[in-house]
Image (tube, rainbow, N blue to C red):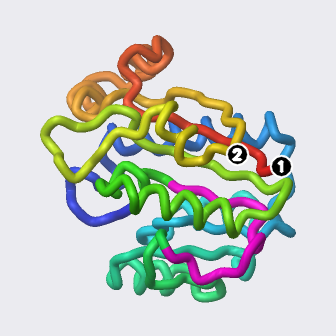
Amino acid sequence: MSGVGESRFAFYQPDVVFFRHSIERGLAGFFRRTKLLELADKKILEVGCGWGNWLLLFLSWGARAENLCGIDLLPERVETARQRLPKSEIVLGRAEKLPWTVESFDLVFQFTLFSSIVSPPSRQEAAQEIWRVLKPGGHFVSFDYFISHPANPNTVGIGKRELVQLFPDASFHFRRLGVFPPLARRLAPLSVSLVHLFEKTRILSGHCLAWSIKK
């Protein structure tokens, strides 16, 4: 989930800058391919919104604050997101039980939510809730680790096969992004160009951007 705070993940760290730009490029490609170019009239939800960083990005891309919604499990993150997005609806709650009605949103997205839910039944419940609140013709966007981190038992990789299993009615398009974080942290301070080169090979990519339109 998105965040600010610890120096290792601070906005000014070279690998964090690279990571953010990589996601933005991936999202820009998604918007071009789907021709979802006007966000002002779209109702948008982030599940696992953290401090609201990505909602703010969508705001800068033309979304209206009153059309933005977010939900997160941690009170301190929700409070910060509410302060940063006072006109948006930011809710304290769980992804497994979203408080919105059926077919409420034109766009629902999650950034590293599923990889932080280690319980398979809970992941399935969250996926069902996301699909429930998405309108027919609406877009679902997922950005997540597809490789489990061996040093972090609280992070579970979500590969293409599992994402398809979580959303059996979706028809996903996939794109690998970024460089595996431990490697990016080592390389980015030395040469961001080198990290970009590794990203182009896709071999050492640690994340996957996926999107689908609900039929």
Q: Position of residue 198 (x, y in %)?
A: 40, 16
Q: Nearer the viewer, residue 155 or 9?
A: 155
At 74% from the left edge and 75% from the top edge, which residue is drawn?
Answer: 102
Callout 1 amino acid: Lys
At 72% from the left edge and 58% from the top edge, which residue is drawn?
Answer: 61
Residue 1 seen from this side: no
Callout 2 amino acid: Asp
Q: Is 101 part of what is drawn in magenta?
A: yes
Q: Position of residue 138 (x, y in %)?
A: 79, 56
Of helix, strand and loop, which one carries label 2?
loop
At 73% from the left edge and 63% from the top edge, which residue is drawn?
Answer: 134
Q: Position of residue 107 (x, y in %)?
A: 72, 60
- Left or right of 29: which side holds 177? left
Q: Are marks 2 and 1 in contact (CB under 8 Å)?
A: yes
Residue at which label 2 appears: 169
* Badge number at residue 33: none
Of helix, strand and loop, which one carries label 1?
loop
Residue 29 seen from this side: yes
Range shown magenta:
97-110
- Left or right of 105: which side holds 175? left
Q: Position of residue 106 (x, y in %)?
A: 78, 63
Q: Upstream in the sequence, badge 2 or badge 1?
A: 2
Residue at which label 1 appears: 215
- Left or right of 181: which side holds 169? right
Classed neighbour count for the residue bearing mark 1: other residues with Cα under 10 Å, few (<14), some (14–19), many (≥20): few
Q: CA distance from mark 2 to mark 1?
A: 8 Å
